[in-house]
Amino acid sequence: MIKHHPENPNYKGWSGALCFFPSGLRQVLIKVPPKLQAELIEIRLRVNQPLELNFGVKYRLIREDGQLTDDPDQALRIGTDDLNKTLNAFTTGSIYAIEQELAQGYLTLPGGHRVGLTGQVFYDGESIRIIRNISSINFRIARPVLGIARPILPFLWRKGHFFKTLILGAPATGKTSLLREIIREVSVGVPELGISGIRVAVVDERSEIAGGYRGIPQLDIGPRTDVLDGCSKRDGVYLLLRTMNPQLIATDEIGREEDWAIIEDIINAGVGFIATAHAGSLTEAALRPGLKKVLEMGAVERIVTLSNRLGIGTIESIKPGMDGPELFNSKAVGLGR
C-alpha cells in the first residue's frame, strides 16, 4: 500500500480530506451520511455562495446541521472569513511560500488531494505571476478506484504489446482515474493477461495523475513507474526518453497543436504511449486541431471514450482508430460502480 505524507498517514480518502478544513466547516462536513461520503468527489466554496458538494452525477448543497438540500436559502453560505481560514489551513498559514503554485491556479496537498483556485489574477509580462484575493476553492478528493481498468485491459494489450491509447471524455468523466489505474495495473503486472510488469514513465504536468506533493507521488501508480511532476510535456517526454528507458509513456490532457509532434517523437523512439484528452466524442476530438493531427496520422491504436451517462466513467466504446469497428461497447459499466 502506498505510504502517505509522514506528518499524517491518514490523508487518504474522505477522513484525510476533512483534516485540511478549519474546525467550523469540518464539523458541518463530518455530518454527511457515510454512504454519501464514499461518493463525494468535490467540495466547492465560493464567497457569499452556498457550500456545494459534487457527488459525480448530482450536485447538492449542505445546511449548517449537515443535512443536504437543494434550496440555496437553507444552505450554509461561505463568507470571506470562511474561505480565508480554509486557504490558510491548506497552506499552513503561509500563502507566500506557495506563490509559484498559486500562479498555476491549483495546489496539490499531502495524500494527493487537489485544490483549484480562482480570484484576482496578476501578470508578469505575458505570464500569470500569482492569483490573489481568492474568491472560490474547489477541493477535489483523492480517491483511487482500484480494479476499474481490469475489464478493458484485454483490449489494450496483446502479446507483449500495449496499444497506443487515447482516452477521451468531457471534463469530470473519470479520464484521469482510469489512466492512473491502467498505469498501476501494467506497472504491477497482470499475469493472467500475460503482463509481467512494464516500465512506465509519467509526465504529470499538473500533478493530477500521481497526486505529487513536493515531487513525491501520493497515489499508488505501481512499482515500475517513474514520474516527472510539474513538468511540461515537451520537456518531460524528451527527458524520460533520454534517461529512464521507458516501455510506456503516460500523460494527461493532450490536444494542443504542438502535442501531435510530441506523440510522433514517442512513436519514433519505439515507445508506447497512453494519454487523455478533453472531448465528449470522437467527432468532437476530430474538431480539435491538435487531436485531429494525432488521430489522422494513424498513431492511435485504441480510442477509449468515457461519459457520465450511467455515472462517472461510463465506458461508451473502445475503437482501434477513427474509422475502426467497435471493439467494446458497455452500456452498464461505470468506474464508480
Image (cartoon, rainbow, N blue to C red):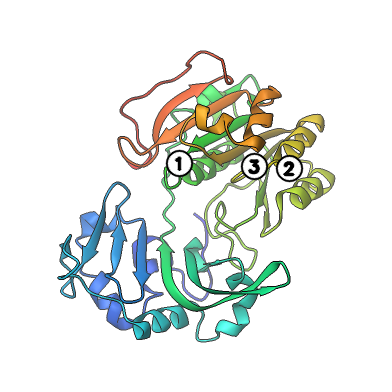
Q: Earlier in the sequence, mark 3 or mark 2?
A: 3
Q: Is residue 10 in view?
A: no
Amino acid at pointer 1: Ala
Q: Residues within 10 Å of mark 3 (few under 14, many from 20)?
A: many
Tell me how far mark 3 sits from mark 2, CA to CA: 17 Å
Along the viewing direction, whichever of 325 and 1 lies nearer the viewer: 325
Q: Quadrant location of residue 328?
A: top left
The numbered dot on residue 258 is 2
To which residue does mark 1 refer? Answer: 170
The numbered dot on residue 129 is none
Q: Earlier in the sequence, mark 2 or mark 1?
A: 1
The numbered dot on residue 250 is 3
Helix, strand or loop at label 3? It is strand
In the visual, does 268 lie left or right of 127? right
- For the point 47% across and 45% down, which residue is it? 177
User: Where in the figure is residue 56, as x and y percent of width and height?
Assistant: 33, 49
